[in-house]
Image: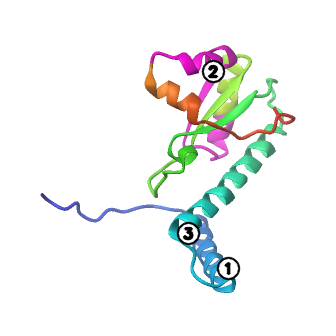
């Protein structure tokens, strides 16, 4: 079996600096807290921090109304980031639910434009409510595993 060759990953300078700063903070916190914690504990801590930052960014965006009006009912995180089994190649999968499809699509565009999600889907409320009984196992899994990102008051 042939081994894959080297690959190039492009990241912005700001993302690289942020990652290095985060690693430095984790090392300082780890040294200050005593013995090294397990990788699983560090991963869970990172997931919790990342999820709170994502929630905060989504709340900020929803507070800025669209010119065409309407707000999302909810923004859902799904996929590997929601399950917690993400890796370095994982993107952020979001699903925007609104009363009307057109409103959900406008919010999906806003999230993409703001760089919040890699894949952002739009769905009206009726389709979302029917998802748990969808014929596709993939869509049933999305409904089962999705994590809400907006507080009820924000939606």
Point out residue 58 in the picture as x, y percentages from the top left corner.
74, 43
Q: Which badge, 1 or 3, comes first in the chain's sequence?
A: 3
Nearest to the observer: residue 154 or residue 36 = 36
C-alpha separation, residue under disc 1 versus residue under disc 2: 41 Å
**35 displayed left or right of 1:** right
**Which quadrant is the N terminus positioned in?**
bottom left
Which residue lies at the image location 62% right of the left edge and 22% below the top edge? 123
Point out residue 103 in the picture as x, y percentages from the top left corner.
72, 22
Point out residue 127 in the picture as x, y percentages from the top left corner.
61, 16
**Which quadrant is the C terminus positioned in?**
top right
Q: Which mark is residue 51?
A: none
The residue carrying pointer 1 sits among few (fewer than 14), some (14 to 19) or many (20 or more) residues within 10 Å by Cα, namely few
Magenta stretch containing residue 133, yes or no? Answer: yes
The residue carrying pointer 2 sits among few (fewer than 14), some (14 to 19) or many (20 or more) residues within 10 Å by Cα, namely some
Span of residues in magenta: 109-135
Q: Which mark is residue 29?
A: 1
Toward which corner of the image does residue 64 lie, by quadrant?
top right
Would you place residue 11 above or below residue 57 in this image? below
| Residue with the mark numbered 3 | 16
Which residue lies at the image location 67% right of the left edge and 52% below the top edge? 51
Q: Which mark is residue 128?
A: 2
Would you place residue 66 above or below residue 100 in this image? below
Toward which corner of the image does residue 107 lie, by quadrant?
top right
Nearest to the observer: residue 90 or residue 116 = 90
Mark 2 residue element: helix
**86 displayed left or right of 64:** left
């Amino acid at each position: 079996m042939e081994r894959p060759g080297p690959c190039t990953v492009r990241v912005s300078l700001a993302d690289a600096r942020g990652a290095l700063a985060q690693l430095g903070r984790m090392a300082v916190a780890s040294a200050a807290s005593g013995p090294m914690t397990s990788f699983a504990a560090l991963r869970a801590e990172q997931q919790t921090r990342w999820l709170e930052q994502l929630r905060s960014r989504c709340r900020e965006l929803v507070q800025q109304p669209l010119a065409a009006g309407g707000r999302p009912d909810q923004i859902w995180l799904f996929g590997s980031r929601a399950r917690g089994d993400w890796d370095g190649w994982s993107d952020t999968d979001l699903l925007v639910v609104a009363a009307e499809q057109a409103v959900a699509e406008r919010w999906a565009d806003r999230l993409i434009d703001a760089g919040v999600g890699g894949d952002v889907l739009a769905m009206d409320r009726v389709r979302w409510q029917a998802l748990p009984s969808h014929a596709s196992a993939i869509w049933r899994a999305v409904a089962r595993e999705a994590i809400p990102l907006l507080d009820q008051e924000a939606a």
